Amino acid sequence: MKLNCVAIDDEPLALDLICKFIEQTSFLKLVGKFSNGVEALGFINQNEVQLIFMDIQMPDLSGMELARVLDGKKNSDKTRIIFATAYHQFAIEGYKVEALDYLLKPYSYEEFLNASTKAYTYFERLNSKSENLVTQIQETNTPEFIFLKVEYQLVKVMLKDIAYVEAYKDYVKVHLISKPNPLLSLTSLKSMEELLPSKSFMRVHRSYIVSLEHIDSVSKNVIQIGKQHITVGDNYKEPFLEFLSKWMN
């Protein structure tokens, strides 16, 4: 599945950057770029657009005004917005119009990719519902996934395949059940913590995130996943012990 995307920004450099990011992301397709909201609205009304990346401060029709117009339309859940702006004070207002995410300029490709992955997951679930496949998906327990930048490509990684994530200098090592060697991705452990669902993954050390599903045993403050032993850090003991108490019950 590819998401049809539109980019809207009255600053040429900012517009070029977001178009570049869209074009280098495998599950996104750039179908239009605009320097003002009025032209963009006309295009969106006449074409199938799933995802809009747009600035907020624009002449004639601001990004927030355009969002409110789209929010009032029938089937507005089929077109979603990710704001890309230099003004952090609009964040709360952005969530009021149910924006999927809020990129604060200057943002990196990593941040862009994280926001785009949220959008992909949203539309994947929406499509499943529209095709009446929700029950089937629950019964087959189809795993969700993330995209990781590994060397010069984006790699699709099933969440259920992740055993644990380890900080490694400016990278992270993503240790998988299905592969003997970890994936090395240029990102931070903090970004991974934000990307991975908290119901399935927990940070237990300043250098480790573990899959709760793949914990084999716990001895005092040490977690065992396969042959790996991971110590629970002092700053992470309380939430882990809370999880452990539910696990033991």
Image (tube, rainbow, N blue to C red):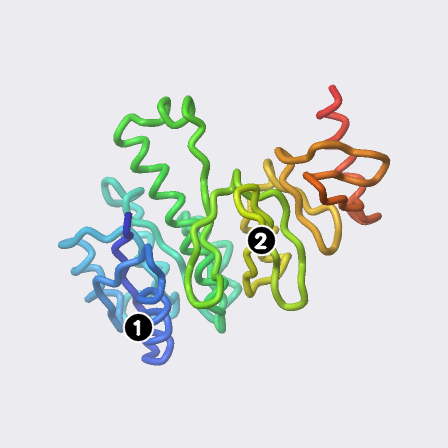
Residue pictured at 67% horizontal, 59% vertical: 167
Residue 163, position in %: x, y? 61, 42
Q: Position of residue 137 (x, y in %)?
A: 38, 28
Image coordinates for residue 9, horizontal then vertical, percent: 33, 71
Residue of label 2: 181
Is 56 drawn above or below residue 209 in the view shown? below
Residue found at the very far top of the displayed protein: 249
- Is 139 located above or below residue 153 in the figure? above
Q: Secondary structure at mark 2?
A: loop
Q: Residue 219, which numbered label?
A: none
Give the residue drawn at x 23%, y 40%.
Answer: 74
**Left or right of 23, for residue 177:** right
Question: Toward the viewer: 233 or 92?
Answer: 233
Q: Earlier in the sequence, mark 1 or mark 2?
A: 1
| Residue corresponding to mark 1 | 59
The crowding category of the residue bearing disc 1, from other C-alpha atoms within 10 Å (few below 14, some 14 to 19, many at least 20), is few
Whether 164 is drawn above or below 154: the answer is above
Which residue is at a point 42% across and 59% down the rendered structure image? 154
* Picture quadrant of residue 21: bottom left
User: Looking at the image, which residue is at 44% across and 62% down?
Assistant: 112
Q: Amino acid at mark 2?
A: Asn
Numbered disc in front, either 1 or 2: 2
Report whether 224 appears left or right of 57.
right
Q: Residue furthest bottom?
A: 13
Q: Quadrant of the C terminus?
A: top right
Q: Nearer the viewer, residue 36 or 182?
A: 182
- What is the crowding at mark 2: few (fewer than 14 residues within 10 Å), some, or many (at least 20)? few
Residue located farthest toward the left when viewing the structure as drawn: 46
Q: What kind of element bears circle 1? A: loop
Cβ atoms at labels 1 and 2 below 8 Å apart: no
Left or right of 220 in this view: 45: left
